[in-house]
Amino acid sequence: MTVRVISVGLLAACAGAADPAGDRARYLGVLREPRGPVDARLARCAEIGDADLRGDCALAVAQQEGRRPQGAISRVCPEVPEGVWRQECWFLAAEAARRRGEEEAAVELCARSGPFAEDCAQHLWQGEVYRLIHDRGPVAFGPQLSAARRAHDAWAARLGAGEAFSSRFWAKYYQNGFEGVGARVDLEACAPLPDADAARCVAAGVELYARELRPRAEREGVDLCRTPPWTSAELAGVVPCTPDPRLDAVLAGLCGASARPDR
């Protein structure tokens, strides 16, 4: 997850104690003059006392430049304060390059985004994965596997990536499939795959099921911590799935014994 520009109202309210009114005025003044000289707007940002508001202001200038014809966020990023704000600027610059179809430039910009680098890189390849499998669903896991492997290898080479990338890639591939046609977690769809791929598929399905349980149960008013534990068959209307002992294990381990009230 990446840091995004915080709302003007919130930042203005949290401006530095030394001169909150002045900081707020400078910040809002920059936002109201998106076509002024970049150096002048950055200079006004630099006068802001609160460090977070100052960084957010410079990042806003970079985004303003990105919205201008012939503008480029990346030209402003070196002037954004070091740390999280500049790293976020490189992230946004990479996304802008991706939208222009400049994949190699986007990869280079992601590499500058520090702790956001893996999330940034995922934004470059996840659309391709989605298009491979989402509208086909789990029945296409096998037929689309060769194309998915080619995409994986191509992106791994571009990114100079290792195991962390592979884990993200295959989790996204299988989860996009489970979320697609039919929108249900069916671990039996993994069975025809080669052993290593089947294991990735099952792990992705179990992870997706576990991730969806709490928010969906809360919306439905379901107490997940009852005794005895729920089964995936009983909760198939909450998280659509083909009942499976591996999903039952998720439910059984969801709450500690002390958290389950007797029924």
Image (spheres, rainbow, N blue to C red):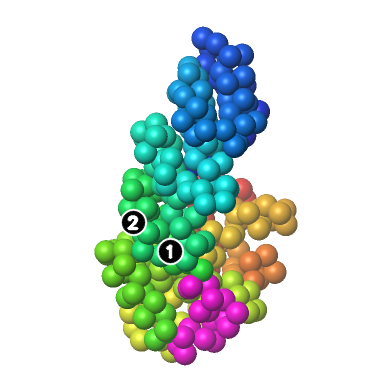
For marks 1 and 2 on the same chain, the one whose residue lies earlier in the sequence? 1
Q: Mark 1 highlights which residue?
A: 102
Q: Residue 259: image x %, image y %? A: 55, 46
Label 1, secondary structure: give it.
loop
Q: Is residue 28 above or below residue 96?
A: above
Q: Is residue 91 above or below residue 178?
A: above
Q: Residue 72: image x %, image y %? A: 48, 48
Q: Does the stretch in magenta take in 133?
A: yes
In the displayed structure image, the side of residue 224 where residue 43 appears, left or right: left
- Residue at the farthest top position: 18
Please provide the residue range marked out in magenta: 128-144
Measured Cα–Cα span from mark 1 to mark 2: 10 Å
- Residue at the farthest right position: 220
User: Mark 1: which amino acid?
Assistant: Glu
Q: Mark 2 highlights which residue?
A: 108
Other-residue count near label 1 (Cα within 10 Å), few / some / many at <14 / 14–19 / ≥20: few
User: Mark 2: which amino acid?
Assistant: Glu
In front: 53, or 245? 53
Label 2 near label 1: C-beta < 8 Å? Answer: no
Q: Quadrant of residue 165?
A: bottom left
Q: Residue at x 33, y 79 (%)?
A: 196
**Quick check: can you spot residue 207?**
no
In front: 135, or 72? 72
Label 2, secondary structure: give it.
helix
